[in-house]
Structures are given as structure tokens and as C-alpha cells.
Image (cartoon, rainbow, N blue to C red):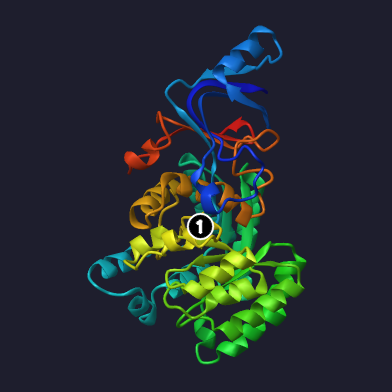
Amino acid sequence: MQTLLFNIGSLVTISQKGEKYKTGMAISDVAEIKDGAILFSEKIEWIGTSSDAKKKLDDKSIIPDKIIDAEGKTVLPGFIDSHTHIVFAGNRSDEFGRRLRGATYQEIAESGGGIQATVRATRNATIEELFDNGLRLAKSAIKYGTTSLEIKSGYGLDLETELKMLRAIKKMKEVLPIKIRTTFLGAHDFPLEYKDNHDKYVEILCKEMLPIVAEEGLAEYCDAFVDKGYYSIQQAERIFRSAMDLGLKIRMHADELADVDAAGLAADIGAISADHLLFISDKNIDKLRDSGTVATLLPGTAYFIRMPYAQARKIIDRGAIVALATDCNPGSCFTENMQNILSLSVINMRMTAEEALNAATLNAAHSLGYSSEAGSIEVGKDADLILTDTTSYIDLFYHFGVNHVDSVWVRGELFV
């Protein structure tokens, strides 16, 4: 079915030149068309102005099945959330209360909370329970404008539970229309069973877990939490080399709690994305830029656990590829709303609205290998579109704390 949207107050195409991603001056351009129009089925078929659309309707060169007057509204490509942990069990609101009373993230982890608390709950959950929880959060994310997701495992820390999580994600892929990439994060933390023998668990990851994940095709990526108190550079490199030998690509939790040179490792091994980067060094910003590794910034996490924000301004100005994502998870950032992330990025990381939109769409799509089919509104790409109740894309940032999404199309089908 062909749908025509016309009288669009602001049609934010993000790109009109077929870029795979944007850096430098280009990231400040969102390729806006005023009084725009767009014709789409499963794919985007035509883009122009409303006056052009009227001519095409009059001469019957287009005969859409449905025509929608979008006067006073904004159309954008769907958001690409390239870092989430939405498949899990349990609830950690009690920890949140402890943090409000002064406990740190590390203190909570040392007392048996943090990731380990979710591990206990997830090990006890069924695959159906994990699927249901992930599906609920994914559907909520779509209502806020997300049309592509990355989802990580990492709350099992043993073969049985990690596979259970990955299979729940696979089931989500089968029932949801949105694009989903899967990341194996068996190296999220060290299981309590190996708290005194970390290298043994690394061996299990490399020799037992990764081969099964790869053989069953349950993930496209491998990730590890490379940071102070978690995986060392040496341990992470061993895991990543094993993963790459099995055909998996690399994403990385890097330098969130301290500068441990994790971003440098990401660049050196050709990781697709290095995420968090609250304490990245200038040297490693340049290494990410030169390697093409995406710097995925997660301002919701810094907000939620009261940490300093990543230096987005410096990372952008030095020419690295910057993406934005929610890091939706039960412990350190419980939001699936990309509109919240946009607001935090411009206020607390000093990004411009245009930089934030590019980072949350085209650049994030590039980090997931989707930029040829998603992340911008261009002829031939999938019709993953959001219609907002705002007259300008700036209003998404100006009027914050509400859901501006009126409609969401995924591959041309109306979802919201």
C-alpha cells in the first residue's frame, strides 16, 4: 500500500546524499525540507515538496492508497537505539533508592547488588518471562520513536542462561517488525562462581560459550565490559580475538568508570563501536577517529548514576563518529525513550539539536550496519518513519519530558 504524507511542516531527511555516517561540519546538517511530502510503501519511493506532490496527484503520476495531511507536524527517520540491555528479569528499584541516599554504583555491586542481582533473577527466569519483559520494553521504545534496536545478553554469566537470553532475543526478532541486532555480552561481569579465578571464566567464554553462540548464529556481535574492576585489556583482547575468529564483530563497554585505555583497544582491534567513554583520553578520541570506530555516547547512564558526562563536544570537534543510545537496563539507566536521550545530549553534553538527531539516526544506523537501509529518509531506504506533533524538530528538545510521537511506520506499516 502506498501512503502519501504531505503539507509536512518539517521533513527531516537527515541525508540527501547517501552518506553512511556524518562527522565534522556535516553532522550539523539535517537536510530539512519545509512544506515537504513523502510517498512510501515498504520502501521510500519519492520525496519532495507539497507543491510537487500536488502536481503528481493532478497528473496521476502517483496514485496513493492513503493520503495524510501532516500540516504543522514533523517527520523524521525512526530512532536507532544501538545499545540496550532490555532482556532481563527482576527489579532493582531498591538499589536506586540506595543511590539516592548516597551509595555508589561500586558500593552496591560490592554488597551483592548491581549486575549480580539481575544475574540471580535472570538465571531463575524462564525464556518466556525474558521474552515477555523484552517485548514489553521494545514495544514501549517503538511508541517513543525507535525503529531499530541492539539488544545484549549479559545477565546470565553462564552458558545456560546466556543462551536463554539470546534465544529470547531471537524470538523477539521473529515477532517484532523492527530491525534488531544481537550482542553476546557474556563478559558483562565475572560470575560469583569464578570471583577468585577470573582467567578461568575468560577461558570458558572463549572455549565453550563463544563457539556455541557462533555456531547457532545467535549473535552478530561480542561485547565486554572493559573497565576498572571488570575486564582488563588483556582479558578483553583474548575474548575479542576468539570472537572475531568465529566471525563475530566487536562492540565494547569502554572507559565508563575510569580511563583504562579501553577505547584504544577498541580502535586497535577494529571494533565497530566503543560505548560510554566518560573517561576517554584525547589520544584515544583521535584513535577512534582514525580507526572509524563509532563513539556511542550514553548520557542517560551518566544522569542516572550521577557520573560526569562524556565529552561529546570534544569528541565531535576532533572528528570521531558519534552515535547516541539509551543503554536501557535495570540498574544504571532504566529508560527506553530516545527522546529523553536527545534532551540530555543537548543540555548536559552540549551537542546541538542537529548533531543529536544525526547521532540518534544515521550514525547509530551505521554502527549497527543499517545505514544503507535506515537512519535517513532517502529513496530506496526502508520506510521507518516517525510523525511528531511538533512544528519543528527543535520542539523535540524545547518541550521536553513528553512523548511527541504521533505515528510510527515500520517498513511502511503503521505500528503506532
Residue at 67%, 42% in the rendered image: 18
Question: Most extreme residue toward the bottom, as rendered?
Answer: 196
Could you tell me residue 319's position as x and y percent? 54, 60
Would residue 111 appear left or right of 412 to someone viewing this image?
Answer: left
Q: Nearer the viewer, residue 149 or 259?
A: 259
Q: Is residue 258 visible?
A: yes
Q: Nearer the viewer, residue 54 or 400?
A: 54
Residue at 53%, 54% in the rendered image: 24
Q: Nearer the viewer, residue 77 or 165?
A: 77
Count of labels shown? Answer: 1
Q: Quadrant of residue 96?
A: bottom left
Q: Is residue 123 visible?
A: no
Could you tell me residue 16's position as x and y percent? 62, 37
Q: Which residue is mark 1?
A: 86
Could you tell me residue 258's position as x and y percent? 42, 78
Could you tell me residue 317's position as x and y percent? 47, 59
Residue at 71%, 81% in the rendered image: 207
Q: Quadrant of residue 194?
A: bottom right
Label 1 SS? loop
